[in-house]
Amino acid sequence: MEPSSRAAFADAGADADALREARGLLVGRLGTAPRDALAWADLAEVECRLGERETARLCAEAAACLAPRDTRIRRVRAMVLLRLPEWGERGRHELGELEGGPGLGRPGEAGGACRAPSGAG
């Protein structure tokens, strides 16, 4: 393995480790404050980046149930839904409402919340 490849692999592993640590902290937070919508949204982002997209969807839905008008939470949910083919249309619709238009992108074109680190999964 080339030195640059080893460094990239190590960075991806460190990123995945940091995400797993963040997951643990958020789960602990939700154990003491289960109605914390922002913690559910943060957990959705972490789960999605770890490749746990169905778990991410459930966390995003929990956040949206607790704070249905919060635009950040709605955006997280939309980005998570875009990563799931069977939910992509709903994600595009949600983004369209947030942006004031008909909907954006195609399923699988989400960025940010669902970008899995290299080596995760």
Image (cartoon, grey):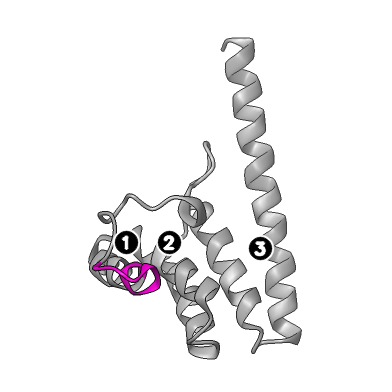
Q: Position of residue 81 (x, y in %)?
A: 36, 66
Disc 2 and disc 3: Cα gap in Å? 14 Å
Which residue corresponds to mark 2? 53
Looking at marks 3 and 1 on the same chain, the residue that comes earlier in the sequence is marked by 3
* Residue assigned mark 3: 23
Does the stretch in magenta take in 34? no
- Total tally of numbered discs in the picture: 3
Whether residue 10 is situated above or below residue 37 in the rendered picture? above
Magenta residues? 95-102
Identified at 34% across, 71% down, the residue is 100
Whether the residues at callouts 2 and 1 have beta carbons within 8 Å, the answer is yes
Question: Image point 56% across, 12% down: which residue?
Answer: 1
Amino acid type, label 1: Leu
Q: Which one is earlier in the sequence, the residue at label 2 or at label 1? A: 2
Q: Which mark is residue 84?
A: 1
Contact between marks 3 and 1 (CB within 8 A): the answer is: no
Q: Classify 10 Å Cα crowding around label 1: few (below 14), some (14-19), many (20 and above).
A: some
Choose between 28 and 76: the one closer to the eye: 76
| Mark 3 or 1, closer to the camera | 1
Residue 119 rendering spot, x and y as whole percentages: 53, 37
Amino acid at pointer 3: Arg
Q: Is residue 103 above or below residue 39?
A: above
Give left or right: position of 86 versus 21. Answer: left
**Label 3 crowd (10 A; few <14 / some 14-19 / many >=20):** some
Q: Amino acid at mark 2?
A: Arg
